[in-house]
Image (spheres, rainbow, N blue to C red):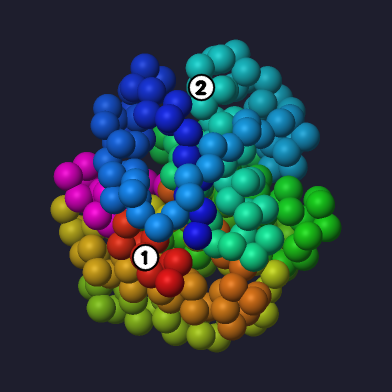
Amino acid sequence: MKIIYDQRFADPSYAPDNAGLPGRMASAMAGLRGGPWEVLAPPPAQDADLLLAHDAAFLEGIAGDPPRDAMARLAAGGAILAARTAHGGEPAFACVRPPGHHAARGEAWGHCTFNNVAVALLTLRAEHRIHSALVLDIDAHTGDGTRKVLADWPQAEVFNPYAETAEEYLAVVEARLAEASSVDMVAVSAGFDGYRLDVGHKLDTPDFERLGALARAASLRLCRGRRFAVLEGGYYLPDLGANVAAFCKGFAE
């Protein structure tokens, strides 16, 4: 598996929100460095990529904030590289910021700017690499932006699991993936704020490994193992690295 990351994601001067907490990206990468994965630095997304998911006026507005624009383009570029890597036969995890699943075509909220997962999938579709996709969003919050951006693509499904307990949550994910029909790509909006000490107060570290393994198994059944994941939320820094590493272990093996 490949890890997509650039040291610029750790720059604390951009966007002092939860996704840009000092040390957050270092925490996310802490469990991945030195692992069995090659780390690749992405190129920034270009206008042609971003316009597949966003309105031109929205891009113009973001361009008025150059530091935000540069970081968000790098994040979207990371998702695109992860998706292309996955299509080439090797899974990938894009450890990027800002996140994206609350970004619609003309607006964004919740620390998001560009919809990284949607941009990546739409880029692959525009390149005639895929015609269908399944997005599993395991963030504690609904991927409303991803749903809106992909709403006109009937062959792309966004699944946001809900349950009261971790056991029920895992069962819901397993059941839904088991009944899924064949697709060309499985993508995961990998939020870690569902952790028991984060805002979701539900999942534990081994649960993230299980989620990664469920996504991996689904991809093997549905699309010859083609799968990628992109970092969304996750704000309890002491355990973020362990949770990310656990997910990646299940996702990769």
For the residues labelled 1 and 2, say whether their Cβ atoms are less than 8 Å apart: no
Instruction: Give the residue drawn at x 21%, y 64%.
Output: 204
Residue at image mark 1: 249
Residue type beneath disc 1: Lys
Residue at image mark 2: 68
Instruction: Give the residue drawn at x 71%, y 25%.
Output: 57
Disc 1 versus disc 2: nearer the observer: 1
> Which numbered disc, 1 or 2, marks the residue that appears first in the sequence?
2
Q: Position of residue 163 (x, y in %)?
A: 31, 72
Q: Tell me the distance, in whole angstroms, between the alpha carbons under discs 1 and 2.
A: 31 Å
Residue 105 horizontal side relative to residue 153, left or right: left
Q: Is 63 inside the magenta-drawn segment?
A: no
- State the SS at label 1: helix
- Mark 1 closeness class: few <14, some 14–19, many ≥20 residues within 10 Å: some
Asked if 30 appears above or below 220 in the picture, the reply is above
Asked if 200 appears above or below 56 in the picture, the reply is below
Q: Which residues are magenta?
A: 232-244
Residue 96 horizontal side relative to residue 245, left or right: right
Q: Is 243 inside the magenta-drawn segment?
A: yes
**Magenta stretch, main secondary structure class:** helix
